[in-house]
């Protein structure tokens, strides 16, 4: 970091102004070019199609399932491609979701359940018991799901990519952080940006149920208003005249300029 001449950050200026200002006192050049997943889709929506299902095959049928539900009525649940949990933790989440009475779309990878002899059998039984209450899939097209009008809340591990995707889509979050930056992200979601709730390290069914109801049923006014404002800022930032779009263009020009200088020196 000390030898770096610039920082490239997957964020946008309005989201983290105090942190970016602090970094600007240390680094001469900072390029905020996020939400990066949006910029990658601006000109060519198919450009990254081959990389979006690196780990598991997406089950596109879940989008059809979402089509049958009213606006902002569904809880989308996904803890990313790395997070694992015990059977007890999984059942606490399941009971909390079912007890909330709200339909849910839950992504559970076949290797996500640890400490059990036959996790696949457990998963199949859970799917059977979920019929009529929600839908469980092994992997889903997350950006498309979050953009679907039926989705009203996102129960997430607070990974940075997921956080930005949810903000861009304008979907309030319920955060269950587990390691590294997820705790900071979750804290920002709940206490700085005020666009969701922080479960901290608890996944008790009563907490899950209450937070789901607070977002989907009660539609917490402060959270909804904050999310609407921040989501609009995220969307504006990646438009052609937006700050992130312009910063990306400036970064490319600066890199090209450095390369030309190096070529001229060799000549």
Image: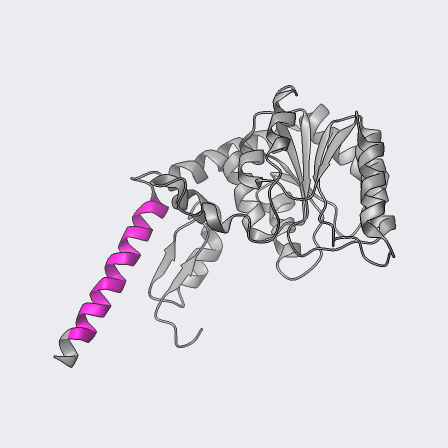
Q: Quadrant of residue 101?
A: top right
| Image position, residue 242 (x, y; %) | 33, 41
The relative height of residue 245 versus residue 232 in the rendered view (above or below) is below
Asked if residue 252 is among those painted magenta in the image, a careful observer would answer: yes
Q: Is residue 178 above or below residue 258?
A: above
Q: Residue at x 60, y 30 (%)?
A: 63
Residue 258 in percent (x, y) is at 23, 68
Specify whether 28 is left or right of 128.
left
Q: Is residue 72 left or right of residue 28?
A: right
Q: Residue sitting at 65 percent across and 26 percent down?
A: 65
User: Is residue 204 something that shows in the picture?
Assistant: no
Query: Dividing the image into 4 quarters, which one contains the C terminus?
Result: bottom left
Residue 132 included in the magenta stretch of the image: no
- Front one among 130 and 215: 130
x%, y% of residue 99?
Answer: 84, 30
- What residue is rendered at 85% in x and 39% in y? 125
Observer-nearest of 124 and 134:
124
Magenta segment, prevailing SS (helix, strand or loop): helix
Outermost residue, bottom side: 266
Quadrant where the N terminus is found in the figure: bottom left
The part of the chain drawn in magenta is: 243-263
Q: As rendered, which of 122 and 146 lies closer to the eye?
A: 122
- Decide if residue 103 is on the left or right side of residue 13: right
**What colouring method underlies this structural image?**
one colour
Q: Residue furthest left?
A: 267
Q: Nearer the viewer, residue 146 or 12?
A: 146
Q: Residue at x 72, y 24 (%)?
A: 217
Total number of numbered labels?
0
On the question of residue 249 being in view, the answer is: yes
Q: Is residue 215 above or below residue 160?
A: above
């Amino acid at each position: 970091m000390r030898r770096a001449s610039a920082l490239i950050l997957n964020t946008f200026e309005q989201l983290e102004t105090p942190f970016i200002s602090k970094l600007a006192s240390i680094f001469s050049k900072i390029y905020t070019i996020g939400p990066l997943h949006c910029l990658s889709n601006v000109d060519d929506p198919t450009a990254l199609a081959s990389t979006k299902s690196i780990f598991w095959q997406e089950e596109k049928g879940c989008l059809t399932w979402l089509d049958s539900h009213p606006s902002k009525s569904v809880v989308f649940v996904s803890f990313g491609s790395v997070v694992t949990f015990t059977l007890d933790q999984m059942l606490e989440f399941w009971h909390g979701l079912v007890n909330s009475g709200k339909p849910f779309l839950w992504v559970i990878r076949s290797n996500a359940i640890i400490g059990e002899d036959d996790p696949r059998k457990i998963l199949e039984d859970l799917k059977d018991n979920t019929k009529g209450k929600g839908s469980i899939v092994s992997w889903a097209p997350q950006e498309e799901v979050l953009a679907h009008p039926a989705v009203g809340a996102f129960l997430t591990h607070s990974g940075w990519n997921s956080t930005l995707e949810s903000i861009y889509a304008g979907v309030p979050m319920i955060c269950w952080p587990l390691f590294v930056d997820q705790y900071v992200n979750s804290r920002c979601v709940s206490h700085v940006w005020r666009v969701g709730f922080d479960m901290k390290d608890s996944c008790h069914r009563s907490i899950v149920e209450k937070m789901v109801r607070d977002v989907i049923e009660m539609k917490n006014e402060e959270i909804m208003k904050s999310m609407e404002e921040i989501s609009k800022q995220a969307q504006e930032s990646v438009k052609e005249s937006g700050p992130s779009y312009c910063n990306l263009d400036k970064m490319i020009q600066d890199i090209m300029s450095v390369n030309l200088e190096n070529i001229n020196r060799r000549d």
